[in-house]
Image: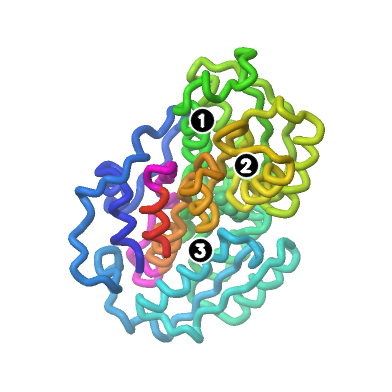
Amino acid sequence: MKKKVLAALLSVAMVATLLAGCGKKEAPAEAPAETEAPAETEAPADTDAEEPAETEAPAEAAGDFADKKVGVCIYQFSDNFMTLFRTELENYLISLGFAKENITIQDGQNDQGTQSNQIDAFINDKVDVLIINPVNSSSAETITDKVVGAGIPLVYINREPDESEEQRWADNNWDVTYVGCDARQSGTMQGEMIVDLGLEKVDMNGDGKVQYIMIEGDPENVDAKYRTEFSVKALTDAGWEVEELDDQVGNWDQVKAQELVSNALGQHGEKIEVVFCNNDAMALGALQAIDTAGRKVGEDIFLVGVDALSEALENVINGTMTGTVFNDHISQSHSAADAAVNYLTGAGNEHYIGCDYVKVTTENAQEVLDSVK
Ligand code: BGC
């Protein structure tokens, strides 16, 4: 597992938060502060280069879960970020003592009907715990009722159900939790990376405003909503004037984003100073469009994404992306597996298990890349 290396990337405060079982979500607004600098010094001494994840493994000894059945529903296998997430989740579950043949991971193919059938099948199969990345977070209430009704503990991941749904879990004391990061933080970090460049550099046409385009993930996802809102808010909070030239839904998809950004560049040309993408897959598509249009990131346009996919990290290192934000699939998948274990052992969980994003610029991109490889 890669947790130890990653710890090096987190500030003291963040490590403390993680060790404390991950922070409760807070009413947000403010930028979540100084998370960008990798804190080399507090990296735990890495005596053994490989495995095991003894520090974060929950109580039970390996082997106790060998006969436990885990059902995992992923909204769509073709999503790059969720592919990293599910691969790490499976490996970590195995490292905790779950048997590979008892871990079943299903592809919802971005269709709630398909996923609901998969959940029904898991219930019929009497799985011991379910980990669900819902296709539509708005279906969470129906999913929860079904799963809780069958007496199966449930860990939601990545797509956060709304507040009233989370409140129901607490009010009824159900074995249901959500594991994920607060998307407001990632949006704020995207905006801050642009602000850190300085207005003079970003406002290339010198009209006193920053002209940007926004490429969003799927509209019902809070990650998309918050990243869209908080990235721009970081600019206005810095006292910058902004002008939105275009705001389009790219559904987290590289090909779609390439098409959208290509259209926007055709329409608005040199007026576009910043391209915000809600994730890296779309930022990679945006970069293809930027290249084709003969523009140069860092020289006549700026581009930020979220996730820290390896390809995006390479681009940050080469200067072909301004920055990204590390969406820690390692910490999130481990927390999800740990939460599943806590339900199986009866230890239980809080109803919200958070984590922190990390800003990635040229300064720490190589380090982040080394840690996720
Ligand atoms: C990630 C996206 C991903 C989405 C899936 C987000 O947190 O940043 O890359 O497509 O989750 O729900």
Q: Which residues are magenta?
A: 341-364
On the rendered structure, is 349 left or right of 166?
A: left
Disc 2 secondary structure class:
strand
At label 1, the amino acid type is Ile
Asked whether the residues under the numbered discs 1 and 3 touch, taking CB atoms below 8 Å apart as contact, a structural biologist would say no
Residue pictured at 56% horizontal, 78% vertical: 104
Mark in front: 2 vs 3: 2
For residue 271, above or below residue 139: above
Disc 1 secondary structure class:
helix
Residue pictured at 59% horizontal, 82% vertical: 125
> Mark 2 packing: few (<14 Cα in 10 Å), some, or many (20+)?
many
Asked whether the residues under the numbered discs 2 and 3 touch, taking CB atoms below 8 Å apart as contact, a structural biologist would say no
At label 2, the amino acid type is Cys
On the rendered structure, is 220 left or right of 163?
A: right
Q: Earlier in the sequence, mark 2 or mark 3?
A: 3
Task: State the scheme by which the image is colored.
Answer: rainbow
Query: Split into 4 quadrants, where in the image is the C terminus?
Result: bottom left
Residue 306 within the magenta-colored segment of the rendering = no
Q: Which residue is mark 3?
A: 85
Q: Which residue is mark 1?
A: 194
Q: Which residue is mark 2?
A: 277
